[in-house]
Image (cartoon, coloured by chain):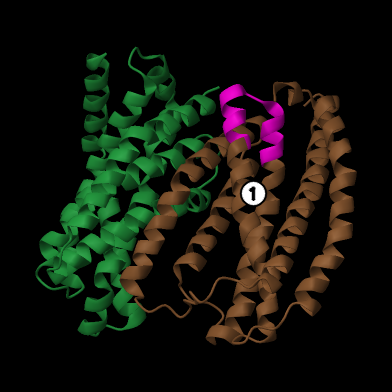
């Protein structure tokens, strides 16, 4: 890990990973989308609207996964002063925020035909909304300081505090929800998901993850270039 | 080391006493903000009684949030924060003491004045002790967690909006369990679980938050 504290070596690793991830996205995305939108059967209850799931669920998974990347990078940056971990965390945060927003928006579009309303204060929706605000706070704290290194360290502390709190928030919201909404609108603890739907879902999840890697590489390259520019300007 | 701790506590309390007006402002905000609710949702007693507990808890949370700016910013400006950093006592301990002194001037006053708000909101008589009890147990956690946000923003020149964005998501568990405790006590149902969770949050925050606050303050003073 410490070898990659060298920006050039990190850049070389990124250059090696990027074509494979991009090729994976380009190859798998059409297959995944075709499986999800055409080949998989409509749901017996939800009809065609179930196809939103193939975007919604991978986005929600990535929203959580990306926060772990941000927090892991931040922890490494705080413990070892690892400069590149900091950059990876910073690069990942806006991607995670967009995944979270995507999960919220697709969930809302899915909710309208299913529950008849755009939004319910369901435990899961509420905690994803809070996660979104955690991302926004992290990004805003980065921007709050004139000195970018200070902003990065402050944001790293916040990310680590956030990841300690995340399970507590999730648990509290679950408790609150069972307290206030005994019969939630959506509880389809039906049969486990059928393979004809599972495979498109897993394919889409892989596509989302590879897409994340692609965008992360691009954003890390951007931040590295910004850093060099700052250094060249003597700032 | 203990001498340094008590010296800081004595200094903070003396400052709080000399600037008693600032603490009273927190209470004034608490009462004034509640006044907006009858104006906003109508003064009918049954509406107020139904939303009253939640409204008072949310207002207490916001009042604590508004007071956070005074936690480290004045000390950063006049240089006494650097003296704390140089002290023989660990900064983490001094942070906890500072939070205690700050809580005495905000959270404690909010808890003590909450029965007045309960009367204004037409809450049942059980609320007269249930609200202060839940606030006594919950507001220290609000202060400790809020201190993380205050320390992170110390010296950034950014105001209360960003502090709210950073701190509010982290305070949500306290609000949920504080309200659950207050409502169970008012309804006369079993409030033990919610009270125990509030206590657990407090102990967890007391053990962990000073480290995050101290790390953020060291960063602010670099």
Q: Is residue A203 above or below residue B139?
A: below
Pick out the residue farthest to the left: B125
Residue A175 position by quadrant: bottom left
The chief SS type of the magenta part is helix
At 37% from the left and 55% from the top, the residue drawn is: B173
Residue matched to label 1: A66
- Is residue A80 rendered magenta in the image? yes
Place residue A55 in its image quadrant.
bottom right
Residue A224 coordinates in the image, percent (x, y): 81, 34
Q: Toward the viewer: B104 or B21? A: B104
Residue displayed at 36% across by 18% down: B90
Pick the quarter of the image with the C terminus of chain B: top right
Stretch of the chain drawn in magenta? A73-89
Residue B6 appears anywhere in the view? yes
Which element is circle 1 on? helix
On screen, residue B149 above or below B78: below
Q: Position of residue B47 (x, y in %)?
A: 26, 82
Q: Examine the rendering and report whether any part of residue B140 can be seen.
A: no
Image mark 1: chain: A
Instruction: Tell me if residue A226 is in the magenta stretch.
Output: no
Image quarter hosting the N terminus of chain B: top left
Vertical placement of residue A27 versus A234, above or below = below
Q: Which chain can be seen in brown? A: A
Q: Nearer the viewer, residue A113 or B139?
A: A113
Task: Using a 10 Å C-alpha cutoff, classify the residue at mark 1 as few (fewer than 14 neighbours), some (14 to 19) or many (20 or more).
Answer: many
Along the line of sight, which residue is nearer the eye, A213 or A151? A213
Position of A227 compared to B58: left or right?
right
Tell me what hue chain B is rendered in: green
Horizontal and vertical percent for residue A45? 59, 87
Give the side of residue B30 with respect to residue A190, left or right: left
């Amino acid at each position: 890990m410490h070898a990659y504290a060298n920006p050039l070596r990190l850049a070389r690793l990124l250059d090696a990973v990027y074509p494979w991830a991009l090729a994976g996205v380009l190859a798998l995305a059409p297959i995944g989308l075709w499986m999800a939108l055409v080949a998989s059967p409509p749901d017996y209850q939800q009809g065609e609207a179930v196809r939103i799931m193939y975007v919604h669920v991978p986005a929600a998974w990535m929203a959580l996964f990306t926060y772990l990347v941000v927090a892991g990078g931040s922890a490494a940056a705080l413990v070892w002063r690892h400069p590149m971990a900091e950059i990876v965390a910073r690069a990942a945060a806006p991607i995670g925020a967009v995944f979270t927003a995507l999960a919220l928006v697709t969930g809302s579009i899915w909710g309208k035909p299913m529950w008849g309303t755009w939004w319910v204060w369901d435990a899961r929706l509420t905690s994803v909304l809070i996660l979104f605000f955690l991302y926004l706070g992290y990004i805003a704290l980065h921007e709050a300081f004139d000195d970018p290194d200070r902003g990065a360290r402050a944001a790293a502390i916040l990310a680590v505090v956030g990841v300690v709190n995340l399970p507590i928030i999730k648990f509290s919201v679950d408790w609150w929800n069972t307290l206030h909404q005994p019969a939630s609108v959506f509880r389809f603890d039906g049969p486990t998901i059928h393979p004809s739907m599972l495979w498109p879902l897993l394919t889409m999840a892989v596509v989302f993850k590879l897409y994340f890697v692609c965008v992360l590489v691009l954003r890390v390259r951007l931040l590295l270039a910004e850093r060099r520019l700052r250094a060249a300007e003597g700032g | 080391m203990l001498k340094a701790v008590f010296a800081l506590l004595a200094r903070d309390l003396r400052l709080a006493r000399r600037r008693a007006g600032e603490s009273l402002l927190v209470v004034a905000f608490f009462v004034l903000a509640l006044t907006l609710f009858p104006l906003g949702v109508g003064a009918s007693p049954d509406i107020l009684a139904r939303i009253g507990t939640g409204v008072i808890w949310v207002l207490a949370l916001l009042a604590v949030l508004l007071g956070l700016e005074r936690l480290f910013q004045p000390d950063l400006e006049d240089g006494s924060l650097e003296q704390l950093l140089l002290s023989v006592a660990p900064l983490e301990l001094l942070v906890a003491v500072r939070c205690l002194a700050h809580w005495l001037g905000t959270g404690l006053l909010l808890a003590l004045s909450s029965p007045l708000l309960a009367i204004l909101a037409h809450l049942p008589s059980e609320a007269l002790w249930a609200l202060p009890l839940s606030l006594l147990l919950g507001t220290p956690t609000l202060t400790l967690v809020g201190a993380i946000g205050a320390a992170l923003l110390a010296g950034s020149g950014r105001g209360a909006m960003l502090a709210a964005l950073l701190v509010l998501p982290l305070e949500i568990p306290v609000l949920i369990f504080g309200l659950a405790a207050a409502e169970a006590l008012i309804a006369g149902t079993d409030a033990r679980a919610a009270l125990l969770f509030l206590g657990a949050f407090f102990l967890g925050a007391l053990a962990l938050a000073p480290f995050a606050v101290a790390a953020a303050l060291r960063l602010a003073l670099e």
